[in-house]
Amino acid sequence: MIYTPEHLEIQRSIRKFVDEEINPYVDEWEDAQAIPAHELFKKAGKAGFLGIARPVDFGGQGLDFSYEFAFFEALMGHAQCGGVALAIGAQGIATPALAKYGSDELRREFLVPTVAGDCVAGLAVTEPGGGSDLASLKTTARRDGDDYVISGSKMWTTNGAQADWVCVLANTSDGPVHKNKSLFCVPMKCKGVEVAKRLRKLGNWASDTAQIFFDEVRIPRRYLIGEENQGFIYQMEQFQEERLSAAAYWTVLDRAIGETIEYTGQRRVFGQPILDNQYVHFRLAELRTEVECLRSLAYETIGRYLTGEDMTLQTSMVKLKAGRLCREVTDSCLQFWGGMGYMWETNISRVFRDVRMLSIGGGADEVMLTIISKHMGTLPGKR
């Protein structure tokens, strides 16, 4: 994958947007544990940032995923807190199936205002007892005349406390667990939808996360995305781009290494800068090499993904490597900051807290390892 001038222009534009509309307010939003999503998303939508890879007929720019990835690289690498990027990202991961499989009527009702930033969206898939195991989810959607009636609960829904609608995965039959689920657009104003509580997290404080209950929530059948009982497949497709997007964290890690070089070059211990210790500058060299490997793997995978290849194996590797490297890089960098690294207000401390989620959300490391093992033919009973 090679960036064109158009890719670079998107990155320049989002960095300018971050400087003007995000970074001056991140401390305030971290303290509030939420961004003003409707206000910020409206500005982002007006700038064209929320529909980069969505169809032109429904308000998007109609570009391929590489442009969206370039956008996330610039957003994550330039924003001074991860929660803002997470919230904006959630607006995007709620809509790929809707954009690809939804009826024109459904896309006009939900996709168009989401791309424009006129509403806030979330993805309500994960449940308290299932985590990354979507096959075992318990939420149901039963037919009742011209409606579906949804009952169940969802956990860790990003933007859940401010969302106008959420994309919900629910069981619609008693068939095999991979062929009995459907995706729905569910307005949060529907009777029976309850935001149970905002969840207090280790990091990403500026991004609100909620537990949501659905108590006999009635929606029209036209809110079904695509075909009934195809939702698991649709969601797995959505996960591919979400997991590829995780590699954009390389920009966060590169910035963390750069800030650590600057700090250790100034901080003196025993009469010399910390950076002058061979272990420190060798370790930072190792880490930057690892980050470059992640970037290169991501670009290679995305380039082949855009040609239509099945990149499930490589995408799982990208997601695994990104999560593991986030932990390794930020832990090493924080150590070199010494006592200042342990201070809450230090940027390296915030990065350390924010990126820890990557090995859990969007499919835990263990799920990625299972997928990789399956493709390698090394799972028990598969050899």
Image (cartoon, rainbow, N blue to C red):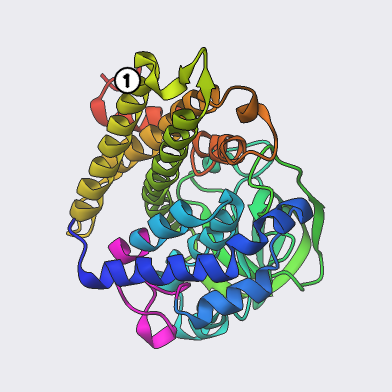
Task: Give residue 120's quadrant in the image.
Answer: bottom right
* Residue drawn 52% across the image and 78% down it: 45
Horizontally, residue 277 falls left or right of residue 121, namely: left
Q: Is residue 148 above or below residue 376?
A: below
Q: Is residue 172 visible?
A: no
* Residue drawn 70% across the image and 68% down it: 36
The image shows residue 339 at horizontal and vertical percentages of 64, 23
Which quadrant is home to the N terminus? bottom left
Name the residue carrying label 1.
282
Q: Main secondary structure of the magenta part?
A: loop
* Identity, as a three-letter code, of the amino acid under mark 1: Phe
The image shows residue 321 at horizontal and vertical percentages of 36, 33
* Residue drawn 40% across the image and 59% down it: 74
The image shows residue 114 at horizontal and vertical percentages of 55, 76
> What is the number of callouts on the image?
1
Q: Is residue 379 above or below residue 21?
A: above
* Residue drawn 51% across the image and 83% down it: 46
Q: Residue furthest front?
A: 271
Name the secondary structure under disc 1.
Answer: helix
- Image: magenta residue range: 49-69
Horizontally, residue 138 falls left or right of residue 254, namely: right
Query: Of 135 and 211, which appears nearest the observer?
Result: 211
